[in-house]
Image (tube, helix red, strand yellow):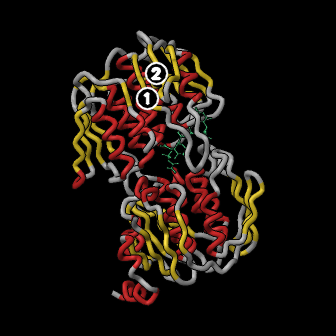
Amino acid sequence: MEKIIVRGGNRLEGTVKVEGAKNAVLPILAATLLASEGQSVLTNVPILSDVFTMNNVLKHLNVGVEFQENNNTILADASNDINFEAPFAYVSKMRASIVVMGPLLARLGHARIALPGGCAIGTRPIDLHLKGFEAMGADIKIENGFVEAKVDRLVGARIYLDFPSVGATQNIMMGATLAEGTTIIENVAREPEIVDLANFLNRMGAKVVGAGTETIRIEGVSSMKATEHSIIPDRIEAGTFMIAAAVTNGNVFIEDAIAEHNKPLISKLKEMHVAFQEEENGLRVIGPRTLKATDVKTMPHPGFPTDMQAQMTIAQLVSQGTSTMTETVFENRFMHLEEMRRMNADFKVEGQTVLIHGNTDLQGAEVAASDLRAAAALIIAGLVSKGYTRVTNLSHLDRGYYEFDKKLQALGADVERVTEDEQNAFSDSDVEALFAK
Ligand SMILES: CC(=O)N[C@H]1[C@@H](OP(=O)(O)OP(=O)(O)OC[C@H]2O[C@@H](n3ccc(=O)[nH]c3=O)[C@H](O)[C@@H]2O)O[C@H](CO)[C@@H](O)[C@@H]1O
Ligand SMILES: C=C(OP(=O)(O)O)C(=O)O
């Protein structure tokens, strides 16, 4: 098991480039299943374990997949006969695998997917996805840990989502592309990743309008062709570096960051006295000497993103004054804070809200990441803590951050990723020597 060791105290300075968005590329990879002709070419693809998992799902479904890591490109060819089953081995690794259901139902009229189950951040049901497919005529059964859906051809319908679920919006939207007639989905998710998916689908020959608004209308077509597409930059990775710059009194240029995609985060950080400058191809973030406390509530886009909640709580912990963080999207996303108690964090959880007493002197400790964003948050906490922080459970980090340790190092942070054997051999003075190299 590897660990990331952080020695706190350095100011971050320099340039960091963000990768393509994990949450955009995963549904777009699933969408390649819809092309019965040609080879999809996806560029700006991040090298992440989630992408390898989705590639494996596609290969299992008989899609030819080639990941050219040297130029962040994936070639995907779904022109052969495809299979209908996504097994537990993949779905249990990554819940986002469920988004192959819409494309499989659209293309084959048959999908059998292992049920994804919950995770450290919440229960994560898929009822809204299934309600949508049922409204479009699919017959759905849940048996032996699998959800199986069958239909001759999906038929367009009017579907209202009780909650603007990102995955349900994507799944139903993809299912509707090859359905008979028109589908109208109301109260949909409006995240930039939904718009990126709709753009890709339209380039493949689909007729999707309204992505980015509350209602999406899809006119079914009879077939779709492979196309080329460049994945949008990862707003959550960009946001994570914004927080890292903010808390370290840093001055960091985030190349490829799109301010429009991170409006709610930028607005909150400005309230905390962080300065932003839009420059060509990116955004400069300048952290103040002292951050001001602020109250934050996560909401579906364009509200404050739940995927930035953990990182934001670190900024709140080092702010002057008392802040609140209210999590409304997932029911259990404060696990990182419980780990942070060992780093001297001062907070009180009351239901969905946590009261954060800022201005605490954080202290390095050994902490375990419970999910992807918790991992990034704990590493950022290490940047502003006294002494050494050791973060374990890095498989979570690798799901969504490419070379996070190296990118922080390039900005001047003392961060090292070590194997367990190396780590066991290290006393603090050995680690000191490691950073002195
Ligand atoms: C791969 C990907 O893009 N993941 C993102 C996606 O996850 P994901 O698509 O899983 O998130 P959803 O928007 O679907 O989930 C939001 C909330 O809706 C609930 N829900 C969802 C579906 C459903 O059928 N029934 C139901 O009750 C969930 O339990 C959760 O409480 O959006 C989340 C919310 O922005 C982000 O945190 C994830 O990073
Ligand atoms: C929660 C996340 O991803 P997933 O939906 O894949 O678990 C995330 O990206 O923070």
Locate residue 279, reporting x and y percent. 44, 64
* Observer able to see residue 66: yes
Establish if 139 lies above or below 336.
above
Q: Are marks 2 and 1 in contact (CB under 8 Å)?
A: yes
Residue 377: quadrant of the picture: bottom right
Pick the front one: 335 or 32: 335
**Element type at marker 1?**
strand
Q: Does residue 79 appear to the left or right of 46 in the view shown?
A: left
Q: Quadrant of the N terminus?
A: bottom left
Which residue is pictured at 24% across the width and 46% down the height? 67
Query: In the rendered structure, which disc, 2 or 1, sits on the residue that comes first in sequence?
Result: 1
The amino acid on which the numbered mark 1 sits, given as a three-letter code, is: Ile
- What residue is at 39 percent from the left and 33 percent from the top? 87
- Given the image, on which type of amino acid does mark 2 rest? Glu
**What crowding class fits label 1: few (fewer than 14 Cα within 10 Å), some (14-19), or many (20 or more)?**
many
Residue 48, horizontal then vertical, whole percent: 36, 53
Q: How many marks?
A: 2
In the image, taking residue 33 as reference, residue 341 lies left or right, namely right
For label 2, the SS is: strand
- Residue 113: give its label: 1
Q: Which residue is mark 2?
A: 148
Q: CA distance from mark 2 to mark 1?
A: 6 Å
